[in-house]
Amino acid sequence: MPIPKENKQINRSFMRDEVYNTLLNWITEGVLRPGEKLLDKDLAETLGVSRTPVREALRRLEDKDLVEAAASRWTRVSKISIEEAEQIYPIIWVLEELAVSMALSSLTDQDFEEMAAANADLKAAIDAKDPIRASQADAQFHDVLIRRSGNPHLINIIQDLKIKRHRLEVHYFEGSATASDSVVEHNQILEALKARRLDTALALIKSNWEASLERVRAQMQAENEDGEQ
């Protein structure tokens, strides 16, 4: 199990949350790969804690379907499936359309500059073949719109869903040859928002998520075909 060797030890005052957040980040960013076995003893030693908070964290991650376990046999990172993407993406784009409807009148020039910078960083990350940075930049672009909705309940729901989406997109940006299409789609969304064209922006938001889902679907299908050869 390739646990990062250089890792700061956990602050015992916030042990449970720190252990959980550390493992969550390792899973969503692909440090711990889909299907990889998780040994609580090794994780505890690396983090400098007892097995108890590690086991608690693994149970919490299992509740989020990021970890799966067979009693007394094994615990592993859940595998990525196209079914998961097909369930998550439509929910996210519907909620993001709602967020855009609420945010459009509040968007400022600074917001547009932040989105443009995130999109530029996305392009640079794709060119550098850095999937984690690409996924983070992609999220930063969309997060401006979500934050500007001003609805904390909507923000929390979307952010919780995007934990799983982040894992899918790190995998996607890692292997997709068409990831750069997202940059073009983001530019179109940004221009529609600047012009305050709500209907156009909503259509482009949905189209961006649909296209992303199709790219994930195509990549996973290609990987499955390669595995069968």
Image (spheres, rainbow, N blue to C red):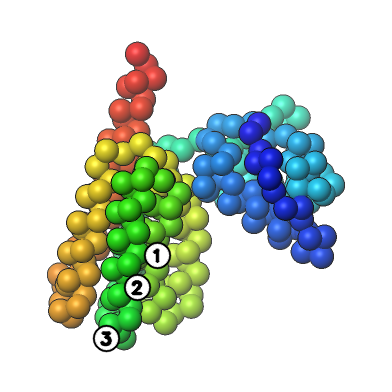
Name the front one of labels 3 and 1.
1
Q: Nearer the viewer, mark 3 or mark 2?
A: 2
The answer to whether residue 58 is left or right of residue 180 is right
**Mark 3–mark 1 distance (CA, rounded to whole Å):** 20 Å
Provide residue 59's location: percent of width, then percent of height.
Answer: 69, 47
Question: Could you tell me which residue is drawn at 41 percent across and 46 percent down?
Answer: 130
Contact, CB < 8 Å: mark 2 with mark 1? Answer: yes
Left or right: 163 as drawn, with respect to 5: left
Q: Nearer the viewer, mark 2 or mark 1?
A: 2
Residue located at (77% from left, 64% from top): 14
Looking at numbered disc 2 in the image, what kind of residue is underneath it? Glu
Task: Assign a secondary structure to mark 2.
Answer: helix
Q: Position of residue 32 (x, y in %)?
A: 58, 39
Residue at which label 2 appears: 114
The answer to whether residue 56 of the structure is visible from this angle is no
Query: Mark 3 to mark 2: distance in Å?
Result: 17 Å
Q: Quadrant of the C terminus?
A: top left
Residue receiving disc 3? 105
Quadrant assignment for the N terminus? top right
Q: Quadrant of residue 138?
A: bottom left
